[in-house]
Image: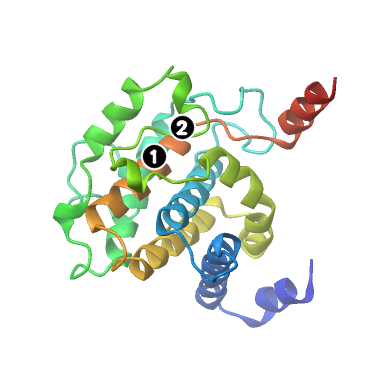
Amino acid sequence: MGFFDRWLGTNSSPEAADKVARQRLVEMVLGALRDPSGRIRVEDAISVAATIVAERCIDAAGDYSMRDHTFAPGSRVFSDRVNQLICGDDAAATVETLPASTVLGHLRRRLDPGTYRNADFPAMRLVIQSFAAGTGDANDWGKVPLSVPTEHLPWILPLQAGYETRAQVDGILRPMRDDPPRCLRIATEALAEILMMVATSIDRRHALALAVETLHGMSKTAPMTEKAMSEAQRGARR
């Protein structure tokens, strides 16, 4: 544990620690995606941030270990617990009626209603149906079905983004690592902050569709693990 983490643990309120972690997550995502000219492709920023939420959702659901599991990376892993975390018990609920404790309920509260309207949110029932319908499509390996126009598809595979950012995210969330729901909440708030930052650069319905469909789909997709990556690299060298 470094000095910064010790300082957070002994000299900061939980609210302040959460704010610092959220800001560090946002800076990490934007910093990783900034090109030599300083530009950031907004679709990749949304997708990466949503994938981080998805991985923390897997952690909070507790159905299996995100970092050490036996599923084939990229395979679909359906979970009632994940559904409850994202949208509660009623997938047909509207964004206005979602429990505040859910990922989407919290995301709605964190977004300025004057910028992102309730009508801009995709219907969760349709998101779930589209994901289920696309299960088994080899073209979707490493990503999720998306309803956004082709020009708004992310360039970075979400499965790759989750694997390549996980160690950094773990480090940022180390002070609260024993509280997975808290980590999920912080990641959701970081996604909300990024959505607010890019609101003038992308159609808001496309932004929310990309965010919600990615966080839902990747939370039901087995992440890449260090063990699976090592095995794949050994196989490639043979």
Which kind of residue does numbered mark 1 sit on?
His
The disc placed on residue 187 is none
- As helix, strand or loop, the secondary structure at mark 2 comes to loop
Q: Is residue 80 above or below residue 52?
A: above
Q: Which mark is residue 220?
A: 2
Q: How many marks?
A: 2
Query: Element under label 1?
Result: helix
Q: Residue furthest bottom?
A: 11
Spot occupied by residue 139 in the image (x, y as percentages of width and height): 45, 24
Q: What amino acid does circle 2 point to?
A: Lys
How many C-alpha atoms fall within 10 Å of the one at disc 1: few (<14), some, or many (≥20)? many
**Which residue is rendered at x = 39% and y = 44% of the image?**
153
**Residue placed at 43% from the left, 57% from the top?**
188
| Residue 102 visible within the image | no
Q: Quadrant of the C terminus?
A: top right
**Percent position of residue 219, x then y:** 47, 38
Q: Specify few, some or many for label 2: CA neighbours under 10 Å numbering under 14, 14-19, or 20 or more.
A: many
* Residue 183 seen in this snapshot: yes
Compared across the picture, whether 94 is left or right of 46 comes to left
Identify residue for label 1. Answer: 216
Residue 176, above or below 44: below
Q: Residue at x 20, y 51 (%)?
A: 95
Mark 1 vs 2: CB contact within 8 A: yes
